[in-house]
Image (tube, rainbow, N blue to C red):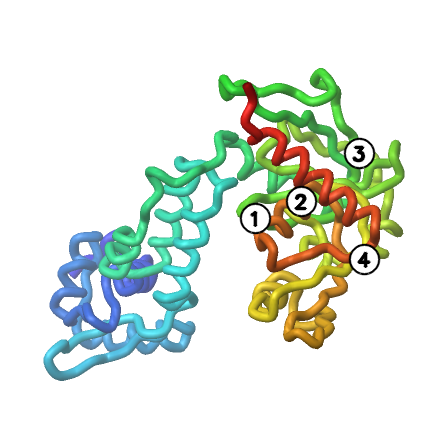
Amino acid sequence: MAKSSNQKLKLLWLARILLERTDEEHPMTLAEITESLAACGISAERKSLYDDMEALRTFGLDVISSKGRRTGYYIGARKFELPELKLLVDSVQSSRFITRQKTLALIEKIEGLASTHQARGLARQVYVRNRVKSMNESVYYNVDEISGAILNNRRITFRYFSRNAKRERVYRRDGAIYTLSPFALIWDDENYYMLAYDSAEARLKHFRVDKMADICTTEELREGAEAFAALDMSLYTTKTFGMFTGEERRVRIRFAAHLAGALIDRFGEDCTLIPRPDGDFDAALDVVVSPQFFAWVFGFGPEAEILSPADVRTSFADYIGRVGEMYEDRP
């Protein structure tokens, strides 16, 4: 039999067929594989397929020969197991900074890492339509641009915006260009943030990546390496609530006994918990004091009380008072 022009691609097509169409529940017989190869313009004999399967095993593919009720060949272990793919799909679809369009595109690519049969199961897991998603389609490329600048030790320029009630962009500083030195990308509270050094203010600041526009990498080398090296990144998001800036303080708070788990979940196993005679406990916490921190404490109601420093306790009382005034009955 004359060999077709595709015959040299036989092993590649065989690998693709096995990867795309087989798994433990869906093996293919030699007859089915021969038919599939023929559809690609490739002839195959039974003996040559045995040799091809062994060649794929030598290359590293986990080609398994099954016997019994499901006789045939299939791919066993893959680079990503099905539970791992489900985890990736869940992570992508729940990420607010990824738009709906990009979410569906990424999930389709993740499905390509499984067999077509497994991919159908992954597709049934997708619930994107009513999720709160970013309105900034370029955020996916913003992350790539920032990562490249960090890797190449370069500063970036960008504009920063918020949105008004009409969903329109409102640029900060009247649309002025920011020039900063990026050092890290942080995932916190379902959003991506860039941590960067502001040379003009000589301090580190963070910005939401989906609110950044017109990002460009410059030829200027970064500044602020010493400030970033002095920062404990493992504690940064723990101390900062909602990624809002403020002054870092050590605050002592009384908590009801049953809230120990909530503190450990937020601050980790090493947070300082001091038992009280009545069964409650005090916590000494290093936090960035901000309205978001006050809101977090307020969420525990009377079961949490800021004890010190005195100025933070007073500021919290003032915060509660201003909120309470909004709800007082007025004539």
**Quick check: 324 above or below 166?**
below
Query: For numbered disc 4, what is the local secondary structure?
Result: strand
Earlier sequence position, callout 4 versus callout 2: 2
Q: Which residue is mark 1?
A: 189
Q: Which residue is mark 4?
A: 250
Horizontal side of 62 relative to 326 (left or right) equals: left
Residue at image position (78%, 35%) is 180
What amino acid type is highlighted by mark number 2? Met
Task: Quote the CA–CA distance across marks 1 and 2.
Answer: 8 Å
Earlier sequence position, callout 3 versus callout 2: 3
Query: For numbered disc 1, what is the local secondary structure?
Result: loop
Residue 219: image tag: 3
In this view of the protein, can residue 325 be seen by the observer? yes
Horizontal side of 83 relative to 39 (left or right) equals: right
Q: Residues within 10 Å of mark 3 (few under 14, many from 20)?
A: few
As drawn, the residue found furthest toward the front would be 331
